[in-house]
Image (cartoon, rainbow, N blue to C red):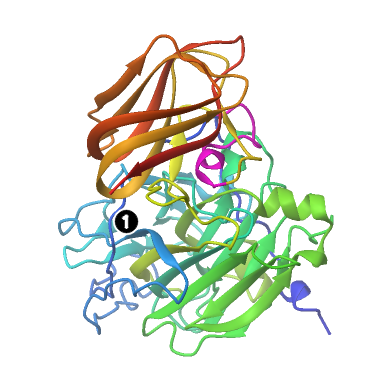
Amino acid sequence: MHTPEQQDPRPPRRVKSWAAGVTAAATLALVAVTAVAYAGTGSGAKAGAGTQVAQLAAAAAPVPPAGFTLTWSDEFNGAAGTGVNTGTWKYDTGPGSTFGTGEIETMTNSTANVFQDGNGHLVLRALHSGTDPRAGWTSGRIETQAATFGANAGEVVRMESSIQQPNVTTANGAGYWPAFWMLGSTLRTGTPWPTSGEVDILEDINGRSSVFGTLHCGTNPGGPCNESTGLGSGERACAGCQTGYHTYAVEIDRSKSPEEIRWYLDGANYFTLPATRVDATTWNNAVHHPFFIIYDLAMGGGFPDAFGGGPNASTISGGQMNIDWVAVYNKKGGTTTPPAGNLSQGRPTTASSQENAGTAAGNATDGNTGTRWSSAFSDPQWLRVDLGGTHTINKVTLNWEAAYAKAFQIQTSNDGTNWTTIYSTTTGTGGVQTLNVSGSGRYVRMNGTQRATQYGYSLWEFQVFGS
């Protein structure tokens, strides 16, 4: 009899190699997405037999759960037949063989595989051409530009999405592998997988109408997290998940001891993983940082193979994963209440660079003066916070570490591209600087142009006040 973890014997869902550096946060809007009716167009076995028909009107992301506030959401409101907004999302393209999972599809940025339908729906569609069921597949994979979604000490973060899995069955869906998941931000700055952490929120394979929830961490193979299997829920029934929309969520709870990760299907907690399952270093490396979010629809690979294999001659072309909405919510702990009027605490924060994995941009807006952002040792460098909407700005407080700015500007923007300077100095003093300013914008940044030391720029806290 296998343990729940052993029931999930598949390779990891890895990304390709990443260049060091932090990707700038993207402006993201509140989302509503639903099912979409499109016929499969590939020429594989029984091509198009998996056509999905729209059954529900587009729904908005729900109001935050009790105690939570909305941090980020998206609704895919582009015109019919258009790809995703590349200011918000990036395509992860190329052959599936490069992901380390045994997938056989090629991921593309074609609107045949990834598109918006003009009615608030995002669709990832797998298409087959030719007569060999193990070749000729294309599909789609996207991830957020921002890697800022997580929980600081004392907080809880919830990632949630409403999704219709591909409308296939075990008879015609062998090889289909839809997923909604996230990877640790430190992967983008050089920390190897799985040390950097991976949280799989939804996976299903072969049209089994199931859900698997998994944490990947530690070292591969083996290690404290049993890689490449990971620590997971095992297979859980997900009735109607191929034919209708269901919500899939995960909460990382750093407000309790021990910390824990909880997985939810339609609001019901079906699996909980406490931090005590692994050693403290493994847990901290995997969880104590932000994440970026990924959707993909893979074909074939180690996970489908572990449950019978595929695709095969009966596998249909044109199956699609439909996404209704995606949202990230945060709940503050009792020790991180922002000062009155502080607009920046807990908001998505990005930077031009970071010195190392432990000095990420979000550390400067987490309300914790024991964590900091620090940049590369060069000029210029910037730190930017997204306030989530346009605000009047009247004060900015900079709590510098020893590596401070001699020359810098405080700038605001409504679009994250065009900037207005509301404060400028060439005689910065370091320490705690409280600047009375007058301006407005959704984005506020510290733009450093001359360092006061041989090191980079380093801030314990970057606080923006206004209304």
The foreground one among 147 and 241 is 147
Please give the name of the residue rendered at 34% of the width and 74% of the height, measured from the top-left corner: 63
Please give the name of the residue rendered at 32% of the width and 71% of the height, measured from the top-left corner: 61
Q: Which residue is mark 1?
A: 114
Where is residue 125, by image quadrant?
A: bottom left
The foreground one among 138 and 466 is 466
Q: Is residue 373 above or below residue 326?
A: above
Asked if residue 325 lies left or right of residue 346, the reply is left
Q: Is residue 357 magenta?
A: yes
Q: Is residue 320 magenta?
A: no
Residue 212 seen in render: no
In the rendered structure, which segment of residues is drawn in magenta? 354-367
Where is residue 245, by image quadrant?
A: bottom left
Q: Give the image location of residue 409, x and y in percent.
A: 35, 20
Element assignment for label 1: strand
Is the magenta region chiefly helix, strand or loop?
loop
Q: Give the image location of residue 134, x and y in percent.
A: 52, 61
The foreground one among 332 and 16 is 332
The foreground one among 234 and 28 is 28
Q: How many marks?
A: 1
Please give the name of the residue rendered at 63% of the width and 20% of the height, measured from the top-left corner: 402
Mark 1 Cα within 10 Å, few/some/many (few <14, many 20+)?
many
Which kind of residue does numbered mark 1 sit on? Val
Asked if residue 153 lies left or right of residue 5, the reply is left
Q: Is residue 346 above or below residue 325?
A: above
Q: Give the image location of residue 264, x and y in percent.
A: 55, 78
